[in-house]
Amino acid sequence: MAENQNYNDLLHKNSYVFYRYPLTLVRGIPLMEPIANQWDPIENFQARPDDLIISTYPKAGTTWMQEIVDLVLNKGDLEKAHRAPIYVRIPFLEICSPPPMPSGVDKLVNAPSPRVIKTHLPYQLVPKSFWENNCKMIYVARNAKDNLVSYYFFDQMNLTQPDPGTWEEYLTKFMEGKVAWGSWYDHVRRYWDEKDNHRILYVFYEDMKKDLAHEIHRVKDFLQVDLSEDIVQKIVHKATFEIMKENPMANYETVPSSLFDKSKSSFMRKGTVGDWKNYFTVAQREVFDAHYQQKMKGTSLHFQEE
Ligand code: A3P
């Protein structure tokens, strides 16, 4: 708890200034500069066999899955789930800010087992040690268009990400994979291809929206946690968009405005499937869909976008 307090104190220090970091390529993947500068400790991170990784392309529903996993592991105990903000409960492996902020690796090295770890790294950049230790991973994927819209708004409010530019400009950058953590297409495809080679549970955001209880059952079975139906229903309720939006331990309201400018967009923005229709013109949709067909050719991976 003291560690959490220190972390939040540092985060709220007025003198602590964040800025929009440029992207730097790491093995061909654009990552925020502080991550690229600290790549060695990330690449050489030592996994433990009981680590659980939650991996996603940014804005695919990471926080939603983090909240669910934490509730499942704590058997629906709300007090435990309210012990700290989500980014403290489940550290972000590759995140690096200038000192004195601890990096994700710093926090995880000292964390007791079993650890739950968040990452956005594409498959090929995940530290080898996780695969060598046969760790479990939950991967969440979201349809490209909603993922893109969500990322566009997030890049406006997250003052450490490159400026998204106009909607039109951002659309092109996303299609070209020139955003932080690289190509959505490569990210979702590669994990899909690898899911049967490792202990990876592949979950779709759209399935969570359609039947959250069903997806929570998949998660608890994968984690081998025994829960009554009552507890599952309690977790469903706690993990709905409306409840999470009001939960300061899940909605990122504890992050200072020098980092997340909530006047631009809120973290828990809309939480829907099909919001892309409010932003894509007919012409943009046609271009995007044609490009999508090329990028996703030959895969058995399919998304619902309505
Ligand atoms: P929108 O911007 O479309 O609203 P991440 O955690 O990977 O950054 O993803 C954030 C996205 O997940 C946001 O999407 C956010 O609203 C959505 N989200 C978070 N919790 C959710 C929930 N309980 N139900 C539905 N969507 C949720």
Image (cartoon, helix red, strand yellow):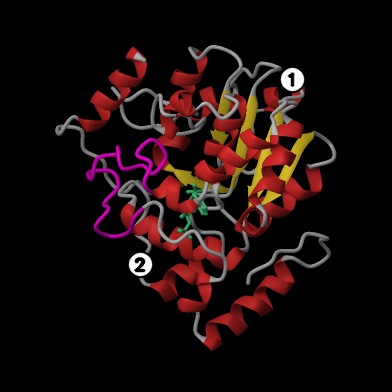
Q: Nearer the viewer, residue 231 or 270?
A: 231
Q: Which x, y percent locates residue 170?
A: 44, 68
Residue 248 among magenta residues: yes
Say which residue appears at 34% left-offset and 39% top-offset: 248
Q: Is residue 177 visible?
A: yes
Q: Which residue is mark 1?
A: 133
For the C terminus, the quadrant is bottom right
> Residue 213 vs residue 41: left or right?
right
Does residue 51 lie above or below 221 as drawn?
A: above
> Helix, strand or loop at disc 2?
loop
Picture disc at residue 165? 2
> Residue 194 vs residue 42: left or right?
right
Hey, what amino acid is under mark 1? Asn
Residue 107 among magenta residues: no
> Helix, strand or loop at disc 1?
loop
Q: Which residues are magenta?
A: 246-266
Q: Which x, y percent locates residue 48?
A: 66, 16
Q: Nearer the viewer, residue 282 or 177?
A: 282
For the N terminus, the quadrant is top left
Does residue 253 lie above or below 278 as drawn?
A: above
| Pointer 2 residue Cβ closer than 8 Å to ligand 1 | no
Does residue 15 lie above or below 22 as drawn?
A: above
Say which residue appears at 64% left-offset and 50% top-offset: 212
**Badge 1: residue crowd in 10 Å (few <14, some 14–19, many ≥20):** some
Say which residue appears at 38% left-offset and 62% top-offset: 164
Q: Nearer the viewer, residue 258 or 79?
A: 79
Q: Is residue 121 visible?
A: no
